[in-house]
Amino acid sequence: MIAALRAAGGTLADVARVRVALAAVEFAEEVERRKQQLVLGALGLAFAYTAVLVATLFIAALLWDTHRLVTLAALALGHLACAAGTLALLRHRARVAPRPFDATRREIALDLELWSQPR
């Protein structure tokens, strides 16, 4: 009887060890993915800001003598549309991204289901 309990305890410890290792791997992957997103987002934002600023100044200077207010209003609306599109894409990507630790949650749920079944 005691040997059977020890074997069950050892099996339970092995299962827990594997699940903790899986969670650690998923956590490391999630941290790395977030770092990459942050760096790419910052670089993209810096380049986009520079390009938009230069383009805006060029267009404003080009049309300053003829249609000053219309040009500035059109540029402002264009920038607003770009911002709305970017935020919509960000929101979409956040919604379709996989849940963090999804594999770990599935495995733990399966373990609990197996352990709760009558023998």
Image (tube, rainbow, N blue to C red):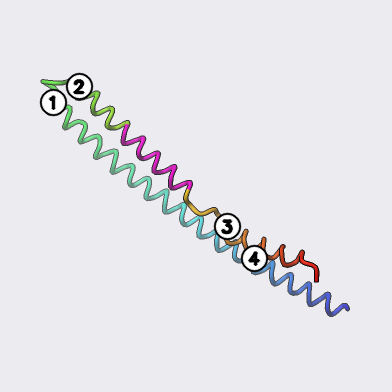
Give the magenta range.
81-95
Residue contact at pointers 1 and 4, CB within 8 angstroms:
no
Q: Which mark is residue 101?
A: 3
**Is the residue marked by circle 4 packed among few (<14), some (14-19), or many (20+) residues within 10 Å?**
some
- x and y percent of residue 109 in the render? 67, 61
Callout in the foreground (2, 4): 2
Which residue is denoted by mark 1 in the rendering?
A: 63
> Distance between the Cα atoms at labels 2 and 4?
62 Å
Classify 45 as above or below 7. above
Label 2 sits on what residue type? Val
Q: Which residue is depicted at the point 80% across and 71% down?
A: 119
* The quarter of the displayed image where residue 80 is located: top left
Where disc 2 sits, the SS reads helix
Classify 60 as above or below 42. above
Label 1 sits on what residue type? Leu
Label 3 sits on what residue type? Phe
Q: Which residue is depicted at the point 81% across and 76% down?
A: 6
Q: Is residue 29 left or right of residue 19?
A: left
Q: What residue occupies the far right of the structure in this picture?
A: 1
Q: Is residue 73 left or right of residue 99?
A: left
- x and y percent of residue 95 in the render? 48, 46
Q: Upstream in the sequence, badge 4 or badge 3? A: 4
Q: Upstream in the sequence, badge 2 or badge 4? A: 4
Label 4 sits on what residue type? Arg
